[in-house]
Image (cartoon, rainbow, N blue to C red):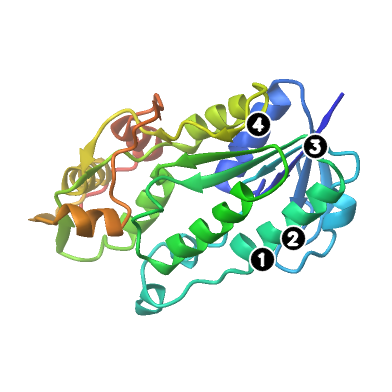
Amino acid sequence: MTLTLVTGGTGHLGRDIVDRLVRDGHRVRLFARARGTRPDVEWAIGDLATGAGLFDALNDVDTVINAATHSPIARRGGVRPVDFFKSPSAVDVDGTERLLSLCEQQSIRHFLHVSIVGLDDATLPYARVKLAGEKLVRASSLPWSVVRAMPFYYLLDKMLAGLAWLPLWPMPTTSFNPVDTSDVADHVVACAFDGMSGERTEIGGPEDLGVAALAGQYRDARGLHRKILPIPMSEAKARGMGFVVSRGVRGRLAWAEWLQRRYSGTHHAA
């Protein structure tokens, strides 16, 4: 049975990817900084940012799914002024380059890289870092695939939670179609083993939502009493901030349904 290495396998998307792989009967090895508790996978301990443990982690591996990333905004659930000027590249650029180099040496059969829809026009430093890493994959001599996904529901939940204390929420009216990690994982695993490679169909959520409308659904699901101030935004500015509508496959889980699962029975007026 072939062996698949997953980087970023302990993150939200990574956990869903590993669940799909295990469910489908694949042998899975997780590359992580610390050993986790799940017993149905192999654990390879190391760090993509430094390369520690990476050579051994690739031993006997057939397919690599690179879902690792380092986004300070996602980790803290909010934007700080520094995020408009710089974003760390040790994982997304240096780590990707190191991983690709070792995969080429070991003749990995398929390297699938998870990326983000709309990077070409996005202006935030994190997006530029992600694009630089993606370009390394595209230039590789390996059989590679790039799967771009829209922003994830759990990240939007985290960002909006950070605004919950404000009585007024200024929100752009521009539309985009965020997606749940469960739907992205299904698409990623399908692309990893369908025998094709190259630029793959991107994936977004099932519905196009204005950011203000999306925030309103979140507010109502939480039982909050906040006023939302819709802010018009030019298309160029929206694209620069990553607010685009993906043109690929659509996930199944809607934002409202995700919110219901997350917050059902937790209402408290505030």
Which mark is drawn over residue 19? Answer: 4
Q: Nearer the viewer, residue 46 or 218?
A: 46
Contact (Cβ within 8 Å) of mark 1 with mark 3: no
Residue 187 at x, y = what percent?
53, 28
Say if 11 sits above or below 84 in the image: above
Q: Earlier in the sequence, mark 4 or mark 3?
A: 4
Residue type at mark 4: give it.
Asp
Front disc: 2 or 3: 2
Q: Find the distance from the CA under tag 2 to the CA under tag 3.
A: 24 Å
The residue under the point 26% across, 60% down is: 164
Say if 51 sits above or below 213 in the image: below
| Residue 109 in the figure: left or right of residue 115 | right
Q: If the image is split into quadrants, where does the N terminus sit?
A: top right
Which mark is drawn over residue 98? Answer: 2
- For disc 3, the marked residue is 41
Contact (Cβ within 8 Å) of mark 2 with mark 1: yes
Front disc: 2 or 4: 2
Q: Find the distance from the CA under tag 4 to the CA under tag 3.
A: 10 Å
Please tell me whether mark 2 sits on a helix, a strand or a loop: helix
Q: Nearer the viewer, residue 106 or 18?
A: 106
Residue 153 visible in this rendered orientation of the protein = yes
Contact (Cβ within 8 Å) of mark 4 with mark 1: no
Q: Find the distance from the CA under tag 2 to the CA under tag 1.
A: 6 Å
Count neighbours of disc 1 (C-alpha within 10 A) and say few if under 14, some if 14 to 19, many if 20 or more.
some
- For disc 1, the marked residue is 94
